[in-house]
Image: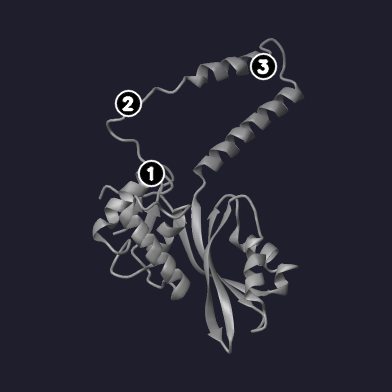
Amino acid sequence: MAVSFYKLTSAAGLKKLDEYLLTRSYISGYQASKDDITVFSAISEVPSSDYVNVSRWYSHIDALMRISGVSGDGCGVIVEGDAPVPEDAVATPPADDTKASAAVDDDDVDLFGEETEEEKKAAEERAASKAASSKKKESGKSSILLDVKPWDDETDMKKLEEAVRSVEMEGLFWGVSKLVPVGYGIKKLQIMLTIVDDLVSVDDLVENYLQVEPINEYVQSCDIVAFNKICKFNLNL
């Protein structure tokens, strides 16, 4: 059965996770898995020691990522973007913007004449803006584990990682990394990243950013090791 959590960047989300880990060493099963990677990636910063169980688990997964990696498949985990509203919370009715919006729109319309080209264009732009805003709110996230391979054993791996992390774009967040031996004295960089799905294409990131000048001076190739969607989940099992 898949496990689910609410927004882990909030105090409420971390408290729920702390309660969940009170009797568990891992998110699912008896060994570290992709489920742990997914939840680990959803936490934006090192948890406070106030969350004893989360802090213990986070340090353990961080150490595994740096030393031996995480290979278990897990049962599937989902992380929702926003924390739930408590049942006893008093809801304040939102302001009714519908009438105000309608009034504004009515003021812009000439009921006694034909709609001009300028008015049509303005209406289309407003509609497109609303659609884009709605789409952005619904956008999900994904956590990715990427293998970055150097050209040979003489490649400066510190500069390689600096080059990789120098790539910046909206919706891209670099995470923890480690060096993994490949053979013949060569090591590869294994690095975590989180992306906003509607803003970042992994294929575009690899082909047009990580394998072009000047980064390709250090990077020979990039491979996706794990790709996990950060989706919605209900912790109240």
Name the residue tied to disc 2: 90
x, y percentage for residue 105?
61, 18
Kindly report the distance in space between the C-alpha atoms of the residues bearing marks 2 and 1: 19 Å
> Can residue 23 be seen in the rendering of this structure?
yes
> Can residue 234 be seen in the rendering of this structure?
no
Furthest toward the front, the residue is 49
Q: Residues within 10 Å of mark 2 (few under 14, many from 20)?
A: few
Q: Are marks 1 and 3 in contact (CB under 8 Å)?
A: no
Look at 37% across and 68% down and name the residue there.
Answer: 33
Q: Is residue 37 left or right of residue 188?
A: left
Furthest toward the bottom, the residue is 184
Q: Is residue 36 left or right of residue 123?
A: left
Look at 54% across and 37% down and name the residue there.
Answer: 134
Of badges 3 and 2, the one in the foreground is 2
In which quadrant will I find the N terminus?
bottom left
Of badges 1 and 3, the one in the foreground is 1
Q: Amino acid at mark 3?
A: Asp
Q: Amino acid at mark 2?
A: Val
x, y percentage for residue 24?
26, 61
Q: Amino acid at mark 1?
A: Ala
The answer to whether 115 is drawn above or below residue 174 in the figure is above
Name the residue tied to disc 3: 108
Q: Earlier in the sequence, mark 3 or mark 2?
A: 2
SS label for mark 1: helix
